[in-house]
Image (cartoon, rainbow, N blue to C red):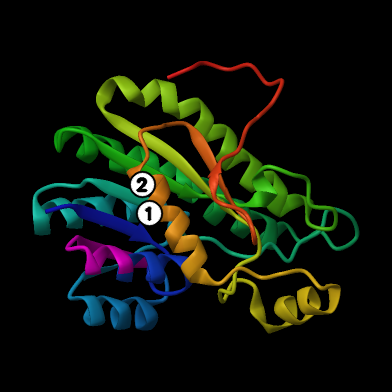
């Protein structure tokens, strides 16, 4: 039976993926800084909940340790926790908000990989999936800090793919465009609606996640956009190692 750790598992994409994996028989550890939301989803799915601030290395290590203690193995680490930036780089720059965004969206992935890797190797291999964004593939005028941390996640995943393949560990990035989750907020949804920009249903992101999970590739960045079949983004004219 597969065991999965999901950060940001209390809502949005994390909770939706948790429900799909539970329906397929996986055992789950849900990690979230929102205890009420995380415990509610965990109770619904008969999963283990661990309070986890992913911007803290010790919290990531504790979440992995909980999975190993409860189930004796770890097969999948879905490093999904994220926050909106709400921080520009000019007069609207906010150092505290900047550090929060980078701490959750980038450090949370780096710390999550570092914490999960020994457990995955001990279990005979497995998969790491990091939630990036289309903002990790294309520039986002008006939100450069968010684009910066999501681009960093894409670079990390593409670089780790060849590094971890010899250990039987696949690494993939999930890169959705705007999806109907709490991180978008009512204001964000209203603005996108005004612009005529389509918003993904979370189920579309989950379908892409499951397709990514079943793939044989590693070091790939799977785009998820309205009206197109999800697949790894082709970084044309950008040579890199083949796995």
**In the figure, is residue 29 to the left or right of 207?**
left
- Where is mark 2, residue-wise? 213
Was residue 100 drawn as part of the magenta stretch in this picture? no
Residue 218 is situated, as x and y percent measured from the top left of the image, at 42, 31
Residue 226 showing in the rendered view: yes
State the quadrant of the N terminus: bottom left
- Within the image, what quadrant is residue 225 found in? bottom right
Q: Residues within 10 Å of mark 1 (few under 14, many from 20)?
A: few
Residues shaded magenta: 20-32
- Where is mark 1, residue-wise? 210
Residue at x 68% of width, y 21% of height: 238
Was residue 25 drawn as part of the magenta stretch in this picture? yes
Give the structural element (helix, strand or loop) at label 1: helix
Residue 176 is situated, as x and y percent measured from the top left of the image, at 59, 56
Residue at x 72% of width, y 57% of height: 95
In the rendered view, tell whether residue 154 sits above or below residue 83: above
């Amino acid at each position: 039976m597969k065991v999965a750790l999901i950060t940001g598992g209390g809502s949005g994409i994390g909770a939706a993926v948790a429900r799909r994996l539970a329906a397929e028989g996986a055992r789950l550890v849900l990690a979230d800084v929102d205890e009420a939301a995380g415990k509610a989803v965990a109770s619904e799915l008969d999963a283990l909940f661990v309070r986890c601030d992913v911007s803290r290395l010790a919290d990531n290590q504790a979440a992995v340790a909980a999975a190993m203690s409860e189930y004796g193995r770890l097969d999948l680490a879905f490093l999904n926790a994220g926050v909106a930036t709400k921080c520009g780089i000019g007069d609207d720059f906010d150092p505290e908000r900047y550090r929060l965004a980078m701490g959750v969206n980038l450090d949370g992935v780096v710390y999550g990989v570092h914490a999960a890797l020994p457990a995955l190797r001990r279990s005979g291999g497995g998969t790491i999936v990091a939630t990036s964004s289309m903002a990790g593939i294309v520039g986002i005028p008006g939100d450069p800090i968010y684009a910066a941390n999501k681009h960093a996640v894409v670079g990390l995943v593409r670089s780790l793919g060849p590094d971890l393949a010899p250990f039987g560990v696949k690494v993939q990035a999930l890169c959705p465009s705007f999806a109907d989750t709490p991180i978008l907020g009512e204001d964000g949804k209203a603005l996108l609606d005004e612009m005529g920009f389509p918003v993904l249903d979370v189920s579309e992101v989950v379908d892409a996640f499951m397709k990514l999970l079943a793939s044989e590739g590693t070091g790939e960045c799977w785009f998820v956009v309205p009206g197109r079949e999800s697949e790894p983004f082709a970084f044309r004219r950008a040579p890199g190692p083949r796995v």
